Structure formats: C-alpha cells, structure tokens
Image: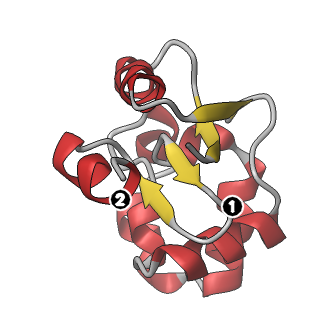
Amino acid sequence: MSKLLVYQYPPCGTCRKAIKWLESKGHELDLRHIKENPPSEAELAELVERSGLELKKFFNTSGEVYKELGLKDKLSGMSREEQITLLSSNGMLIKRPIVTDGKTVTVGYKEEQYEQVWGK
C-alpha cells in the first residue's frame, strides 16, 4: 500500500479512528502532530488545491479556538491568503485529520469516503 502523510492530533478520537482504519488497510503512515507541527502556508495552499474542497472546509468549526476568535462571522470578510495564514498559524484551527499521498487529499474522517479514496 501507499505511504500517507496524516496531519493529526493524538488526543482526537476521530484522528485515532482514521489512523486505525488506514493501518488496517495496510497503509504506511507518516504521522504529523497538527498542533506542534502545523502545515505551512505553502503546504496548506497545496492541500486545499489538491483536495478540490472549499477553503472553509479546512476550518475546525467545532473547535475552541475557532469559537474564541469568532471566525464564524469573520471568515467571509477575509481574503484566501489571510485565511491560509490564519490556519497555518494555529493547528487547532484546522479540521483533522488531513490525509494525503501527495496527489489526493481528504479532510476529516468518514469511513465511506476513506473506503472510496484510500481503500484501494
């Protein structure tokens, strides 16, 4: 199986489920602690591009930091560059896990999606 880069937060139950699922399929994983080692602005821009998702899908909207910063009301007034800079400045703002093989990117964990993308 392929080697996958996984941006994750060890205490996160969703991340643990995703990692367990990926390992059960035989993937070799390079685990990155998203809080201690968040993706850079350039890495984030590339992840967003490769994912095909809207940038707002990369925000952890249920997280404490997102709520504390009042981002629900602020994001729409920010440029794409400002949003990427903000995301790269604090890994806890980023929805996790992010999984990539360098070409394909998934954000979050839904078993059906993982089966489709990473189950091959």
In-front residue for pair 38/113: 113
Q: Residues within 10 Å of mark 1 (few under 14, many from 20)?
A: some
Secondary structure at badge 1 equals helix
Tell me: residue 81, above or below residue 17.
below
- Residue 25 placement, left or right of 113: right
Q: Position of residue 88 (x, y in %)?
A: 74, 56
Q: Residue at x 47, y 41 (%)?
A: 96
Disc 2 and disc 1 in contact, CB within 8 angstroms: no
Residue type, mark 2 in image: Val
Secondary structure at badge 2 equals helix
In-front residue for pair 47/25: 25
Q: Residue at x 23, y 44 (%)?
A: 110
Residue to which mark 2 is pinned = 117
Q: In the image as oriented, which residue stretches furthest toward the top?
A: 11
Tell me: residue 10, above or below residue 106.
above
Q: Residues within 10 Å of mark 2 (few under 14, many from 20)?
A: few
User: Depth-wise, is mark 2 or mark 1 nearer the camera?
Assistant: 2
First-in-chain label (2 vs 1) = 1
Mark 2 to mark 1: distance in Å? 28 Å
Q: Position of residue 120 (x, y in %)?
A: 36, 53
Q: Position of residue 38 (x, y in %)?
A: 75, 44
Residue type, mark 1 in image: Leu
Q: Residue at x 82, y 72 (%)?
A: 42
Residue to which mark 1 is pinned = 86
Tell me: residue 31, above or below residue 99.
above
